[in-house]
Image (cartoon, rainbow, N blue to C red):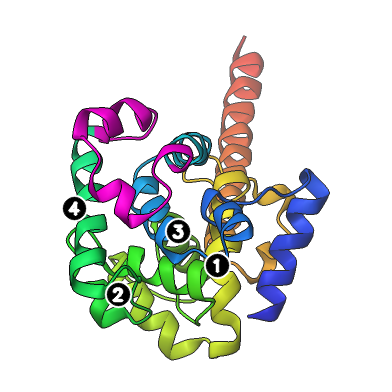
């Protein structure tokens, strides 16, 4: 796993300076504030990093504690976080989360996955993100990027992010869990994209099942083209001889 993570970092350094994901940026700025990271993680779902960063920066200038956010009006929050996807739903959700943190957990975000997933709107991915970015506890948050890259590399053979998480937990030593999400997400956004991945610059491509299959298909296509060229050339020669 170390070779994969190192290879990804080297690839990104060679292509362009790596940037933090929105959650890693929030972690760097708010290491001691699990509540902000929880709210930021909820807002980040189905939203581009730059829009998440924009929203949380504005939000926490006004509502930077569970107490303040719990008393907020939905319309006021909607206006602030308008840059994120599904902001109408998320506005109500984060206010609800703030109230639950206050009433059930005395203003402190729980630091274990079982209690986190009891909070409405907090699934395994969000809970794992909170564990990693707020508490620096070993966990593997699996989004579409982590799911896609893990399958392309052949680390897993799964259909859903939930299955991917469980398989990665079995196969990868716990000491490598913390950097997986940030590294894989950055790699998925910049290099191993869903469409037209940059295999030519990837420094771990020789260990990638997807690249090997793609390379084989490319070789097969070249052989087919050469065969067609040969067949057509023979036909042209015969026609010229006939003439």
Mark 1 and 4 residues: CB-CB less than 8 Å, in contact?
no
Give the residue pinned by disc 1: 32
- The numbered mark at residue 37 is 3
Could you say where residue 202 lies in the image, as x and y percent from the top left? 70, 55
Report crowding for label 4: few under 14, some 14 to 19, many 20 or more residues within 10 A (C-alpha): some
Give the residue pinned by disc 2: 163
**From which residue to which does the magenta span run?**
60-87
Give the residue pinned by disc 4: 96
**Element marked by disc 3:** helix
- The numbered mark at residue 138 is none
- Whether residue 27 is situated above or below residue 57 in the rendered picture: below
Rendered-image quadrant of the N terminus: bottom right
- Whether residue 100 is situated above or below residue 84 in the rendered picture: below
Find the distance from the CA under tag 3 to the CA under tag 1: 9 Å
The quadrant where residue 36 appears: bottom left
Residue at (33%, 71%) from the top-left corner?
Answer: 158
């Amino acid at each position: 796993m170390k070779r994969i993570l190192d290879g990804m970092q080297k690839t990104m350094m060679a292509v362009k300076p790596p940037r933090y994901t929105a959650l890693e940026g929030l972690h760097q700025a708010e290491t001691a504030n699990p509540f902000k990271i929880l709210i930021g993680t909820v807002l980040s779902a189905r939203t581009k990093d730059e829009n998440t960063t924009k929203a949380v920066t504005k939000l926490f200038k006004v509502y930077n504690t569970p107490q303040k956010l719990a008393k907020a009006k939905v319309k006021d929050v909607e206006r602030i976080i308008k840059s994120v996807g599904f902001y109408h739903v998320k506005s109500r959700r984060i206010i609800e989360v703030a109230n639950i943190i206050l009433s059930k957990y005395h203003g402190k975000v729980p630091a274990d996955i079982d209690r986190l997933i009891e909070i409405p709107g907090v699934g395994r991915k969000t809970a794992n993100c909170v564990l990693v970015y707020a508490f620096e506890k070993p966990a593997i948050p699996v989004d579409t990027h982590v799911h896609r890259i893990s399958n392309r590399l052949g680390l897993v053979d799964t259909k859903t992010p939930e299955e991917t998480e469980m398989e990665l937990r079995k196969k990868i030593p716990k000491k490598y869990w913390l950097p997986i999400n940030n590294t894989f997400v950055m790699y998925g956004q910049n290099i191993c994209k869903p469409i037209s991945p940059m295999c030519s610059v990837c420094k771990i491509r020789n260990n990638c099942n997807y690249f090997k299959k793609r390379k084989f298909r490319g070789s097969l296509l070249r052989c087919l083209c050469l065969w067609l060229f040969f067949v057509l050339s023979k036909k042209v020669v015969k026609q010229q001889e006939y003439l």
